[in-house]
Image: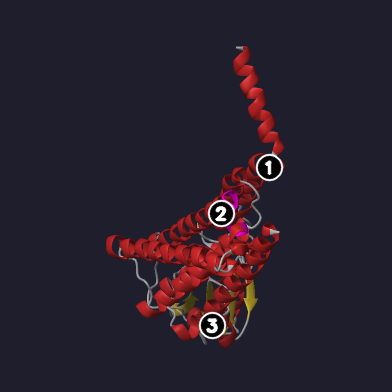
Amino acid sequence: MTALLVVASKDLRLLLRDRGALLFTLLIPVLVVTIVAASLHGTDASVSIQLPVVDEDRGPVAGALIEALTHHLKVEEVDRPTAESLVSARKQAAAALVLPERMSKSYLANRPSTLLLLTDPAKGSEVATVKALLLVAQRDAEALADPLHEDLLLLEERNLTGSRLTTTSFEQNIPGFSVMFVLMATLFGVAFALDDERRMATLTRLRVAPVHPASFLGGKLLARFVLALVQIWLLFAVGATVFGLRLGPSLATFALLTVCVVFAVLGFGFLTAGFMRSREQIIPIGLSVVMITCAIGGCWWPLYLEPPWLQQAAHLFVTAWAMEGLQDLILRESALARVWPTFLALIAYGGACLVVGGWLQRRAMR
């Protein structure tokens, strides 16, 4: 019994020596749980869901319907080009409602009218919520305008961002978990490789060798880049063949996007590894970074489900940019001409991380 207590006491003293590892082990799980809870905490639809409305009717029935909608959604009256831009170009709204001309006159004459709902199916759950609340608001408006509750307002849905009106869970889960596993493998691979070199004093011995340290680090990162690229292509190949996942309108564009994603992930992993000063810190810090960035970056659930402030903060991490690009290709079927800003953002992100990570490694070598 005494020997058991002595060994336990010794191990606890060793753990207390590395304050950084102990801090991440105890406190970061609290932070992760807090962030995940904040990400999944739903808000009132009238506050969180924006619905642009184009009122081409300007009649009493349209006014009653808009008034009913304001009780359930964040309604904003705009013109047709602005509504389409909010849905397709700016991606700020999941849907926009167009109330056609002469709708009120047709309704009062007991003739049906067709409302047009312009949607972005990439935001599938928000679109479904808008459609459900639209039915509720329609019933409220009809109760005011027509005591007989005749169903005279029909709904037509039109996709502004692709060719399909529905999406599947595979199109969120396969890209999300693929990015997560590539990030995890790359981050831990780079961190453990650099720690092994520090333990063996390889970087110190390179000062008197003909190999430049930058070439040495670059070679290690290039090997990880190739491995991560093969990994993400394999994951998506399985998704495409087994689950029927669509990879966008062009395989060449998809391949180019994955190269940019892996480059940014590699840079982020290299930067994160620069803050790890011991082997004991790698696992708690690495797992914490992976879970936090994947949770708020859209890998576990769609980014639009999170509070607006968290959606903005998510773009501090590579996962949000990666998921945005993948969703543009897979869900919105965007061509290269529309997604190149995301490509440039991923390249700039990866390059900045590599520069800062290299600076941290040079400091560690001194």
Residue 56 visible in image = no
Say the numbered circle drawn on residue 216. none
User: Is 32 in front, or is 117?
Assistant: 32
Does the CB distance between marks 2 and 3 fall below 8 Å?
no
Residue where numbered disc 3 is placed: 84
Above or below 107: residue 327: above
**Start and end of the magenta stretch?**
198-204
The percent position of residue 73, horizontal first and vertical second, equals: 61, 66
Say the numbered circle drawn on residue 197. 2
- Quarter occupied by residue 251: bottom left
Helix, strand or loop: magenta stretch: helix
State yes or no: residue 127 in magenta: no
User: Is 122 in front, or is 135?
Assistant: 122
Residue where numbered disc 1 is placed: 27
Q: How many marks?
A: 3
Asked if residue 230 lies left or right of residue 288, the reply is: left
